[in-house]
Amino acid sequence: MKLPFPETAFDLVLCQQGLQFFPDRAAELREMHRVLGPGGCLALGVWRPIEGSPGFAVFAEALSHHISIEAGALLPSGPFSLSQAEKLRALIAGAGFRDIAIRPAVKTLRFPSPDEFVRRYVAGFALAGPRRRCGRRDAPRC
């Protein structure tokens, strides 16, 4: 993607829970670097390892068991794909950023029920298409 802003236009670029989903992360980071002015700051939010998110770990295991190994791998390869600090640091440095500080933080998500948790997250990732077909008369058994 090309940001529609001139070079050095900003003092701060914020990317909250997006970088792990970009098809060309290195190019996106270079673009973020391009629009930052001298002394500017990049703030990223990415997910920590899936092991630190028990609900998602169980969800990934259930997908692997009930749908396919590939379906279960979608979570670690998507939202959690930048959870290793050194991998993230190398990616950011490769785009020209310096003085990189990675500060882990813990956030708590609450859902009304396990069903609602699954509904919200399945709707937002690669299984959304197959899931939406379930329930139609012409759909295969789901």
Image (spheres, rainbow, N blue to C red):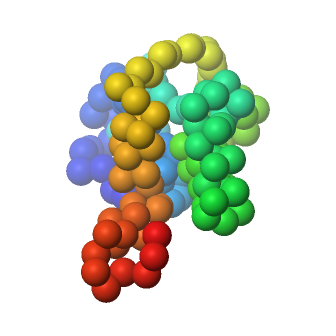
Write down the quadrant of residue 130 in the picture.
Answer: bottom left
User: Residue 103 placed where, x, y %?
Assistant: 61, 15
Q: Say above or below: 139 vs 64.
A: below
Q: Say above or below: 63 vs 118.
A: below
- x 64%, y 38%: residue: 58
Q: Quadrant of the N terminus?
A: bottom left
Residue toward you, 51 or 30: 51
Residue 131 in view: yes
Write down the quadrant of residue 32 in the picture.
Answer: top left
User: Residue 34 placed where, x, y %?
Assistant: 42, 42
- x 66%, y 65%: residue: 68
Residue toward you, 105 or 93: 105
Count of labels in the image: 0
In this view, the residue farthest toward the bottom is 138
- x 68%, y 57%: residue: 64
User: Residue 113 placed where, x, y %?
Assistant: 40, 30
In this view, the residue farthest toward the right is 86
User: Residue 112 placed where, x, y %?
Assistant: 35, 25
Residue toward you, 109 or 58: 58
Left or right position of 75 against 7: right
Residue 95 in view: no
Write down the quadrant of residue 69 in the picture.
Answer: bottom right
Q: Say above or below: 30 vs 51.
A: below
